[in-house]
Amino acid sequence: MGIDLSDFKKKLLEIGNKIITESSSNGVLETLGEGANSLIKKRTRLGYGVSSHEGDKERLKPLSDAYKKVRKSHPKSSDTTPAKSNLTRTGEMLDSLDYQVSQGSVKITFKTQNNVDKAGYVTQGGRPFMNLSKPEINQLKAKLNDLIYERIKNLL
């Protein structure tokens, strides 16, 4: 007299497939895209960048004295002071930070080509900001774990 585990095995495989589908759904990826954008904007506005994927957060390169004078004479953004290096002279570039969900992944990008160009220029100028630090990635992983856990609870 044995126990037939085939129904249990089928049900377990079905739940496993649903978990995989749910964890890579557009809703989950959009939440991660929004979270990454928020982390990058906040850190950068505080004057920090990250030079490599999972790198350390570091102060952005200071502004030159000549550029500080330009910013003093032509104030543009309420997000900064003329002497602070935080990539927010007008606020336009960081405000246009966006994300795209496609084929099971999230890409951090900008709404306009002009802002893609600006981001490239400031990054080459010694102010890299588009990478995520290890603690920021860990925050996103924790958010992902919470989302998946909630979805698993709803499946059972």
Image (cartoon, helix red, strand yellow):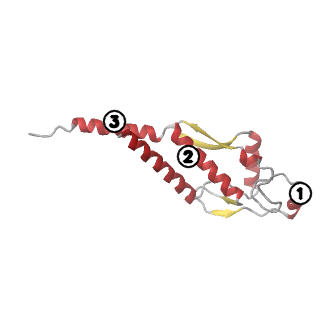
Q: Quadrant of the C terminus?
A: top left
Residue 32 circle label: 2
Residue 101 lies, in percent from the top left, at 58, 38
| Mark drawn on residue 14 | 3
- Tell which residue pokes out farthest to the right in this image: 73
Badge 1 element: helix
Q: Say what secondary structure mark 2 lies in.
A: helix
**Among numbered discs 3 and 2, the one appearing first in the sequence:** 3
Locate the N terminus and report the quarter of the image it occupies: top left
Among the two numbered marks 1 and 2 on one chain, the one whose residue lies closer to the N terminus: 2
Position of 12 compared to 82: left or right? left
From mark 3 to mark 1, how far is it between C-alphas?
Answer: 62 Å
Identify the element where label 3 is drawn.
helix
Measured from the top left, where is residue 132 in percent x and y?
Answer: 60, 54
Q: Amino acid at mark 3?
A: Glu
- The residue sitting at 48% across, 40% down in the picture is 24
Please determine whether, in this image, residue 53 is positioned above or below residue 19.
below
Q: What residue is drawn where x is 86% and y is 59%?
A: 67
The residue closer to the viewer here, 78 or 106, is 78
Task: Give the amino acid at mark 1.
Answer: Val
**Viewer-proximal residue among 131 and 91:** 91
**Residue found 76% across the figure and 56% down from its top:** 125
Asked if residue 28 lies left or right of residue 123, the reply is left
The answer to whether residue 138 shows anywhere in this view is yes
Q: Earlier in the sequence, mark 3 or mark 1?
A: 3
Give the side of residue 16 with respect to residue 29, left or right: left
Label count reads: 3
Point out which mark residue 70 bears: 1
